[in-house]
Amino acid sequence: MLNQSRVVIDAVKPQINCGEFFIKRVVNEIVNVDANVLVDGHDVIATSVLFKHEKSKKWNEVRMHEVGNDEWKASFSVEKQGFYTYKVQGWVDYALNWQHGIDRKIDDNQHVKSELLEGITYLEPLLKKGTKEEKDYLQYCIDCFKDDSKYNDAIKEAMSSQLHLIFTKYPEKLLANESKALQVYVDRKKARFSTWYEFFPRSASEVEGQHGTFADCERLLPRVKQMGFDTLYFPPVHPIGEVNRKGKNNTTEAKDGDAGSAWGIGSKHGGHKDLHPQLGSVEDFKKLIKEAKKQNIEIAMDYALQAAPDHPWVDSHPDWFKWRPDGTVQYAENPPKKYQDILPIYWESKDYKNLWKECLDTMLYWVDCGVNVFRVDNPHTKPYYFWNWLITEVKKKHPDVLFLAEAFTRPKVMQQLAKQGYTQSYTYFTWRNSKQEFEDYLTELTQTDQREYMQPNFWPNTPDINPYHLQGANETKYLQRYALAATLSSSIGIYGPVFEQMIDDAIPGKEEYYMSEKFEVKHYDWFKESKLTLLISKINALRHENEALQQTNNIKFLNIENENIIAFYKWNDDRTNELLIIISLDQYYAQQGNVQLPLDNLGIAVGHRVQVQDLITASSYNWHSEWNYVELHPALPFHIFKINK
């Protein structure tokens, strides 16, 4: 390909898979662009980032600045939801090149009359572009450049910063070169910052032994709000299959009255577009959604593409399942787990177009009911390109819809789902337990290109995962786990009231709850309060009050002389909100250490007073040293300090 431009643009960042996938931001976030831009020889070059929203016709431009070694940087803000396109543009700036050259010759005491006349050719075109004041100044320069009697004035103006600013403001981009256009998708703020609470609606009843309803869930909204959660996630609320229904504690034979697994979707009462009859009607569900929104809570729905043996799809669309020679369908398995009550969908069906359409129609049906957040069950067992298509189709008409990928699986699989469009991702936080594990994992999430497309969501527990470190743990351990999740990540969630009531009975040798709620209706004292519920509420309130906790990527781990204490610094983009978080990882004993303040990041000198205020206890401390002593006890195993300089 012929290209006469002399400017080379290379290594543009951020971009994912050479631009195959878009990067992600939320409204009013910054995109920091980096590129290598160079030219043959020694001419002066200039570069810009061009960007525009998908609905705009005009490109916006921000000039880049060189940071050394031919590397250039610039930033721009994304102010609206939807796609932005951005690219890097570079050109030889002949006007600035002229000014740079004449500046050097004048410094060398050379006579530059010829160069001044040459400069007129760069000034005259600008007479059509500038303001009146700029035009008057340019005409004055031209007159000086022509008049031998004004030579001293001419060389003064030739080197002036005023002329340099005009050249920069109105560049003539001869033979400009451009990088490939890249995309950033901009979501609403909740894509980055959310606090999830999960419970089973069927367990929401005030009466023991009675199946809960959507009205019961509505009664619990004030409690969810009081604890500071903004997203209320329900496991599947659809009819549950009766064929091969699971019994209590995951037994393969259900007894009369056993509720079955909520994920065994579909029965004579309907399928994915229907509701469990004991929960209530569509009108009841819509009312719950509406009442939740009044309290700034969004209902998140489970989107699980699988079917019970008696799901209506099995009869109406048999081609959507893979039948064995004996006329049966192999039930779902994830060894050693077996799901006898679930038939996996056959994604290689010849009727896949109708299958995909029905999956899309199902989601759009619930969007029309008012649901804008979906937790997707086992997305890694469905084709990646299907998700790309479905998410793209939904977001075209409903940009507020968010998708959480429930995929505790191989790293590259989780990353691929994020690249294909998932808004948020479950993570390995559930199993990370040591200081080194936390620091290594957060460094991977926030310092590699994963930061550009993968928004982590940290869950200490889920109905599927009762981690070993919570089994038999004391209250301090639960406090530590919540404080870690809530300060390390901007999106978090817990499965309750199991978590805050420390219900941790496990199947021996497994990370599974004994007598799991997945297979039966439970009864709880929903308004039980404790130190744990109090501190969860307080931490959640701090998350809403402090922008530094509303993003994940701005984090720096700090040195502290104790492997049982983790310390890190977090900040918002303009550093008007800076926090120091220190958490003990010991659930039994007090721990002490000296933490090193990030003075360079704080922009302060050694010896300058720094006031830190504990946002939990309201205590304040004045620190005058780079290293400062801290002590943490099991009764309150963390500090969330606000830094006041």
Image: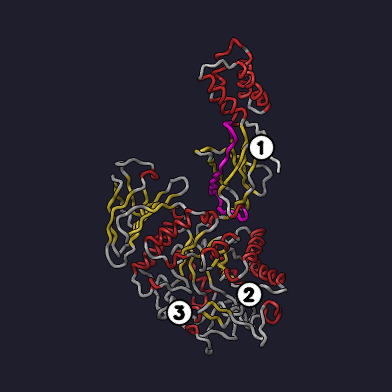
Q: Nearer the viewer, residue 545 or 194?
A: 194
Image quarter hosting the N terminus: top right
- Measure the C-alpha gap from mark 2 to mark 1: 57 Å
Of the two numbered discs 3 and 2 on the same chain, state the one appearing first in sequence.
Answer: 2
Where disc 2 sits, the SS reads loop
Q: Nearer the viewer, residue 85 or 114?
A: 114
Q: Amino acid at mark 3?
A: His
- What residue would you read off at disc 1? 5
- Could you say where residue 600 lies in the image, as x and y percent from the top left? 38, 43
| Part of the protein shown in magenta | 19-45
In the rendered view, tell whether residue 19 sits above or below residue 125. Answer: below
- What residue would you read off at disc 2? 272
How many badges with numbers are in the image?
Answer: 3
- Could you say where residue 247 lies in the image, as x and y percent from the top left? 51, 85
Disc 2: CA contacts within 10 A as few (<14), some (14-19) or many (>=20): many
Image quarter hosting the C terminus: top left
Residue 25 on the magenta segment: yes
